[in-house]
Amino acid sequence: MPSQRPQRAQSRRRSRILAFQVLFEADQRGLPLDVVVRRQTAEANLAPEAVHFTRHLVEGVRANLGVIDAKIEEHAPAFPLRDLSPVDRNVLRLAIYEVLFDTQHAPLRVAINEAVDIAKGYGSESSGRFVNGVLGAVALEAARRFGAEGSDPRSDGDPDLPTE
């Protein structure tokens, strides 16, 4: 019987992209996140589990936004938050939530790679490198926080697939 993990990883990827799109739209249009996430998930044609994960990510960013934005400013001091491109700002918000707060869902490598891919797909030519650099510094902080020196405390041995 074929494994469900690759399909699940693809579903999580789509959820992350949709969560980014919700954060981006709400940020740019000044709309409440709950209004945007409700509309976007209704239009997205995702499985119920993927919709739940998308909402979980958006709510997690909303609940931790002040701390997340402070982390962006701490790890990218040359780039004031208001001056960052909206793509970079919202990709970083999503990924920092996953790296520092959502500790049971994805290994660090997955969260960072997904964020870099989203930045490359939606941002400028330099977005992927910028996001990778900031998230590298955040990941070092996360490793210290979780008591692991350079290792991913959330990995189950397969660095390329998300875990539960």
Image: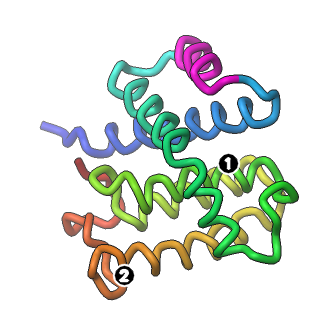
Residue extent of the magenta highlight: 32-44
Asked if the residues shown at circle 2 and circle 1 are in contact, with their CB atoms under 8 angstroms apart, the answer is no
Residue position for label 1: 90
Locate residue 148, reporting x and y percent: 28, 82
Of residues 94 and 157, the one drawn nearer to the viewer in this rendering: 94
Locate residue 28, reporting x and y percent: 81, 35
Q: Of the two numbered discs 2 and 1 on the same chain, state the one appearing first in sequence.
A: 1
The quarter in which the N terminus is drawn is top left
The kind of residue tagged 1 is: Asn
The kind of residue tagged 2 is: Arg
Q: Quadrant of residue 36?
A: top right
Identify the residue at the far bottom of this view.
Answer: 149
Asked if residue 28 is positioned above or below residue 150 in the image, the reply reads: above
Locate residue 68, reporting x and y percent: 57, 57
Mark 2 surroundings: few (<14), some (14-19) or many (≥20) residues within 10 A: few
The question of residue 40 being in magenta is answered with yes
The question of residue 39 being in magenta is answered with yes
Badge 1 marks a residue whose secondary structure is helix
Asked if residue 42 is positioned above or below residue 103 in the image, the reply reads: above
Q: How many marks?
A: 2
Badge 2 marks a residue whose secondary structure is helix
Q: Is residue 94 left or right of residue 6?
A: right
User: Residue at the spot x=82%, y=65% of the render?
Assistant: 80
Majority SS type along the magenta span: helix
Which circle marks residue 144 in the picture?
2
Mark 1 surroundings: few (<14), some (14-19) or many (≥20) residues within 10 A: many
